[in-house]
Structures are given as structure tokens and as C-alpha cells.
């Protein structure tokens, strides 16, 4: 087969289509459906989307096959029809193109597999390679003009896909697109420099980025990426239509078609050869991009000026982008976090090794405790800084108010923010009388609800505790403590309402061992205050032995373990750790339909046991 896509791309910038998934969703198909299977069951709907993009002026349309690989289709019981779904997607696109009487290239879309590859997950590179090969054979045999690898966060996974493609065809054009967040890193923490160095070695024809962020962020990143790649590299860019918002139960993207028209020219000026749209973009967005590209002189850009690097890094006008945790909470992604304690000394290697174990199992955030059980340890925000900078894994800083006056509270928080530690868990902290230094001061000037208010209504608005202006506003994300099985539900409800009113962004719960009772607390809240809106990250503490279970139940305030679970632990004997992990995994399975994350608390620093519990998330095909 002769491919002339690259010749056309070298001759002029080509316009790709926009979103497929969010357009399908906008037409009333819920996200729970298998969108790729619609090629067979609802061909007219998919054909209409292709037709609209062609009429809007797209030179390239992408097949509806983003998730049409064996791994993702298995979630819908469709693993055995990979070839049929992919061939139907290509055939459908081809019929629409032929009916349009226009020269439009068909890109076979290949998305990520939806699970992590080893060592971050359990899928081997061999299995990944085989899954990609199966899909790509079907796409090429059906007659695509090029392959487009979309929205890849794991470069090792992308490499397996590209190698599979090259084994199937040595000459089919390949576009490889990586997804970045606003901080200039992939969701797995890889910098632009690392991406450029690695992807430039892949046998691909076009390198670019898509999804995650809007035109402004993609333009800034693609300019930097272009400078890091060989000058002859062809670039592509397909941004989202801004940052998604949930309005009235629907997901809405704010960037207008006119805004995309402005940026189409800016992308071409930055050296981009293939430009288009991703999530939230429509045929109208593509039509405005087409008009701008066809009439650059007549088109007057309104929003093309981006801040310089100096302006980005300094100055009061700078507004920091949301943390990764904030993005996960906003989009409904499942949060997988685990708690670690800083070392009692200056050597951090053992703790970092434990964090690496949790990260490999699937943790996407780490909670760092501050002086747990009132024991002296290294500063928690120093540990947060080390984890974020050495492992590229975002943290949540536990910030107890005990023993801190209002001056120290504010100074410590500003220091944390300066180190980019911006996820805060506001908590009272353990009484010093129970720890190693019972004579230490236990006084405080602000309670956790007041700390939430200080951060959300003060610091984030550019004001200190006294109402005086800060040099720059902060951008903290603030969590609150929550007990879903409290001894005094009425009091817990009242305090929780105050935390929500003061601006809490999420809740970390005490370890839960009775899911039914926890759900009853939610029901009681809704009966009194209306619909629940606060994202819950549910505490899960794997039990280690019968004695451990009895200690938690009888001596730790806020933890209630049902007799049935304590009996299982007593009977487990020397197999207590194994049984405890099994109980914890069952709890995660029960919790995950109605919470937005799990918060693993390793017992006795046994990170390996926590990792075994975390892995149930991947086994359950939850997005992490």
C-alpha cells in the first residue's frame, strides 16, 4: 500500500478532527458503555460524527478505536471481537470519506491499554506488545492511511505499541502523541526533556501531544518540546477544550470554537504540522480552526500572547495550576494514596524505598504523617519535598495544629507552598501527653476547621490570618478528617458541615471496617443537609494479627472493628497478615463504588502488605 500522508504533511499543515469520546457522550451515550463497540451497534451515530468533522474541514479523521484493544475490551466482555470492532471502525470511516468526495486521510487510533505495565503494574511488556499487535493488524488490514497513538502517559507502553506497529508494517506513517499536565510533565511525572530524549528514538514520523490540558498549556509545552527535538521533527498538537467542569450532572468544556481558531494559527507558527482537538472539541471548533488556517491574514487572533517564562515563574500575576490531586478530584478519577511516616533520623532511603513499592503497586499520591502518635520524627514537609522531587510522586502533607501558634502555622504553610507541597490535610494531631515528650507544649491558636478557612478563604485569596495581603495568593488543596462510624454522629455531622462550609476539598476517613454503617452516615447527612458533594478518600488499614485488631478496636479512638472481623483475625493465627490483607481487599471492593479513593495506612511500616491491597484497584480496572 502506498501512503502519501507524510508528503501532504510536509507540503502544508493538516487539520485533524476533534473529540470522539466526549462527542459520543454529548449525544446521550453514557461513559459506562463501550464506545468502540458502537462501530457495530450504532454505526449511524459514529458515521454522523465523522461526517460532521469532514464537513467542518478536517483533513484527517480518526477511527473510533481508541479503546479497541483486548485489555480494555475485556472490561465489557468483548476481548474476542478485537478484530471485528477495529475493522468496522475503519470500514465505517472509509464509507463516510468516500461519500464526501473529499481527500481525507483515515487515522487508525490506538489508545493506551488502560492498565499499568510492569514494574508499575502487572501487565508484562510481552502481553502489551501482543495486545497492540492484534489491534494494529486489524487496522492496517482494513486500510488505514496512518496510525495515531493517542494520550499516552507511559513511554514504555508507547514504545511497545510503536514496535508492534513497525513489526506489522515498516512504512505506515505513525503519529505518537503523549499527554502532559499543566506542570509540563506526563501523568507519570516524566519531564519534557525525558519525553523528547526517549520518544525521539522511537521509529515514528510525527511526535506531539494531546488531551489533558487546553490550547494555552499545549502551545507552551509544544514550543518547549520542539526545541528539545531534532529540528526536522514533525510536530502535532490536539489540546482539550479547556479544563472540564461538571455542570448539572454533565461534563462541560469551556474553551470556545473562536478561541480554538485563534490558537490554530499559533500552533502552526510554532512549527506544528498536524493540528486538531481532543476532549470537548466539536465540529464547530474544527470549523473555526479551518477558517483560521485558510485565511490567516483575515483572521485576527485575540488570545495568542502567552506569558514569557519569566512571567510564568515570578510576579504577583502568576496563578498556579491545580495540583494533580485537585485534577483527579475534579474529573472523578479514583485516588489511590497511602500513608508513610518520616524517619526518626536523617536517612530517608528506607522510607523512599517503601514509597517506591507503593508507587509500583499503583499509588498515585502519598500521605506524609507529621509526628504520628506524638513521636519525634523528621519534618513532614521536608519528607514531602524529597518524595516529590526524587520520585515524581505528589504528596499530601498532614498538618496538625497542636503545638503551633498562629505565626508558626502560617510560616510553615508558606514554606510548604514554596516547596510545591500544596495538598494539605488539616488535622488536630495527637496529644503530646501520649508521646515521647509529654511535657511538650500542646497549645494551639486555630482548630482544624479554622485552618481550612485560613487556607481556602485566606491564603488562597491572597490574605493572611489578620486580613493583610500576601505577596501572592497560594493554591492549596485542603482535606479534612472524617469518621464515618462515629460514636457521636450528631456532633460529627455538625463539625463536618462546618468543614465543608469553610472550603474543604476532600475528606480522609478513619479506617473503615463496617461499610454498611459508613453508608448510613452518608444517608443521615443527606437527610439533614442535602446531597453529598465532598469527595471521600476512604481509610483502609490492613490488620496484622488478632492482637492488632483488638488493640485498634479497644484503644484507638474512632476505630470500631466488628466482632466477625476480629474473630477472623483471632482464628488466623500465624496467617494473620495474609487474612488481614484479604479483609482489606474485600473492603476496598465494597467501598470503591461510592468513594473517590482509598487511603491505605500500612501497619507497622509493612509497605508490602499495603501494596497487595492497592493492587486490587488495578485488578478491578479502576482508573488510577
Image (cartoon, helix red, strand yellow):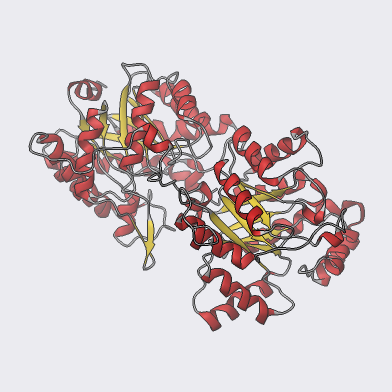
Question: Where is 378 relative to 233, above or below?
Answer: below
Identified at 42% across, 38% down, the residue is: 314
Residue 263, visible in the rendered structure: yes
67, 234: nearer the viewer: 234
566, 324: nearer the viewer: 324
Residue 520, visible in the rendered structure: no
Identified at 55% across, 42% down, the residue is: 418
Instruction: Judge left or right: residue 395 versus residue 437.
Output: left
Q: Position of residue 619 (x, y in %)?
A: 62, 49
Identified at 72% across, 44% down, the residue is: 379
Question: Where is 139 relative to 468, above or below?
Answer: above
The extreme left residue here reads 298
Q: Position of residue 105 (x, y in %)?
A: 22, 33
Instruction: Judge left or right: residue 546 versus residue 11.
Output: right
Q: Quadrant of residue 492?
A: bottom right
Q: Position of residue 596 (x, y in %)?
A: 56, 59
Q: Quadrant of residue 389?
A: top right
192, 459: nearer the viewer: 459
Instruction: Judge left or right: residue 232 versus residue 421.
Output: left
User: Count the marks: how many?
Assistant: 0
366, 421: nearer the viewer: 421
On-image quarter of the N terminus: top left
Q: Position of residue 193 (x, y in %)?
A: 47, 25
Amino acid at each position: 500500500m502506498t501512503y502519501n500522508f507524510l508528503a501532504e504533511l510536509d507540503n502544508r499543515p493538516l487539520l485533524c478532527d476533534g473529540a470522539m469520546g466526549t462527542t459520543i457522550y454529548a449525544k446521550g451515550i453514557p461513559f459506562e458503555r463501550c464506545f468502540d463497540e458502537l462501530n457495530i451497534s450504532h454505526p449511524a451515530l459514529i458515521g454522523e460524527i465523522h461526517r460532521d468533522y469532514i464537513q467542518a474541514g478536517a483533513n484527517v479523521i480518526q477511527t473510533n478505536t481508541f479503546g479497541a484493544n483486548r485489555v480494555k475490551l475485556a472490561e465489557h466482555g468483548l476481548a474476542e471481537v478485537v478484530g471485528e470492532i477495529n475493522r468496522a471502525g475503519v470500514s465505517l470511516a472509509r464509507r463516510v470519506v468516500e461519500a464526501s468526495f473529499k481527500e481525507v486521510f483515515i487515522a487508525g487510533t490506538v489508545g493506551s491499554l488502560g492498565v499499568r505495565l510492569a514494574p508499575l503494574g502487572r501487565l508484562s511488556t510481552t502481553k502489551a506488545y501482543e495486545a497492540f499487535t492484534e489491534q494494529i493488524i486489524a487496522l492496517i488490514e482494513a486500510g488505514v492511511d496512518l496510525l495515531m497513538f493517542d494520550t499516552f502517559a507511559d513511554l514504555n507502553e508507547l514504545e511497545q505499541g510503536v514496535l508492534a506497529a513497525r513489526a506489522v508494517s515498516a512504512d505506515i506513517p505513525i503519529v505518537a502523541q503523549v499527554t502532559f499536565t499543566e506542570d509540563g510533565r506526563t501523568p507519570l511525572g516524566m519531564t519534557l526533556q525525558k519525553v523528547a530524549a526517549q520518544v525521539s528514538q522511537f521509529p515514528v514520523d510525527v511526535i506531539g501531544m494531546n488531551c489533558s490540558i487546553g490550547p494555552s498549556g499545549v502551545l507552551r509545552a509544544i514550543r518547549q518540546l520542539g526545541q528539545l527535538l531534532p529540528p526536522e521533527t514533525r510536530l502535532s498538537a490536539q489540546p482539550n477544550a479547556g479544563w472540564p467542569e461538571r455542570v448539572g450532572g454533565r461534563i462541560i468544556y469551556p474553551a470556545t470554537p473562536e478561541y480554538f481558531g485563534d490558537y490554530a494559527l499559533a500552533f502552526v507558527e510554532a512549527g506544528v504540522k498536524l493540528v486538531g482537538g481532543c476532549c470537548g472539541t466539536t465540529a464547530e471548533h474544527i470549523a473555526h480552526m479551518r477558517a483560521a488556517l485558510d485565511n490567516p491574514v483575515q483572521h485576527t487572533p485575540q488570545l495568542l500572547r502567552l506569558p514569557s517564562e519569566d512571567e510564568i515563574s515570578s510576579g504577583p500575576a502568576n496563578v498556579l495550576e491545580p495540583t494533580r490531586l485537585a485534577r483527579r478530584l475534579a474529573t472523578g478519577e479514583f485516588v489511590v494514596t497511602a500513608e508513610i511516616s518520616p524517619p526518626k533520623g536523617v536517612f530517608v532511603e528506607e522510607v523512599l524505598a517503601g514509597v517506591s513499592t507503593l508507587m509500583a503497586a499503583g499509588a498515585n499520591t502519598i500521605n506524609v504523617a507529621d509526628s504520628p502518635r506524638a513521636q519525634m520524627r523528621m519534618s513532614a514537609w521536608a519528607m514531602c519535598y524529597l518524595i516529590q522531587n526524587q520520585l515524581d510522586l505528589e504528596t499530601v502533607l498532614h498538618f496538625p495544629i497542636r503545638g503551633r501558634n498562629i505565626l508558626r502555622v502560617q510560616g510553615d504553610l508558606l514554606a510548604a507552598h514554596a516547596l510545591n507541597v500544596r495538598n494539605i490535610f488539616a488535622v488536630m494531631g495527637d496529644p503530646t501527653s501520649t508521646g515521647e515528650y509529654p511535657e511538650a507544649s500542646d497549645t494551639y491558636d486555630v482548630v482544624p476547621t479554622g485552618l481550612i478557612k485560613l487556607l481556602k478563604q485566606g491564603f488562597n485569596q491572597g490574605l493572611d490570618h489578620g486580613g493583610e495581603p500576601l505577596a501572592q495568593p497560594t493554591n492549596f488543596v485542603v482535606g479534612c478528617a472524617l469518621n464515618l462510624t462515629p460514636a457521636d454522629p450528631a456532633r460529627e455531622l455538625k463539625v463536618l458541615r462546618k468543614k465543608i462550609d469553610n472550603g474543604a476539598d476532600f475528606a480522609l476517613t478513619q479506617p473503615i471496617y463496617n461499610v454498611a454503617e459508613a453508608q448510613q452516615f452518608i444517608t443521615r447527612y443527606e437527610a439533614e443537609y442535602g446531597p453529598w458533594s465532598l469527595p471521600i478518600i476512604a481509610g483502609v488499614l490492613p490488620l496484622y494479627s488478632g492482637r492488632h485488631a483488638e488493640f485498634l478496636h479497644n484503644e484507638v479512638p474512632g476505630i470500631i472493628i466488628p466482632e466477625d472481623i476480629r474473630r477472623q483475625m483471632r482464628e488466623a493465627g500465624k496467617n494473620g497478615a495474609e487474612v488481614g490483607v484479604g479483609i482489606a481487599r474485600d473492603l476496598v471492593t465494597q467501598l470503591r463504588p461510592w468513594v473517590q479513593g482509598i487511603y491505605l495506612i500500612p501497619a507497622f511500616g509493612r509497605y508490602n502488605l499495603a501494596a497487595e491491597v492497592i493492587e486490587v484497584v488495578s485488578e478491578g480496572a479502576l482508573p488510577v
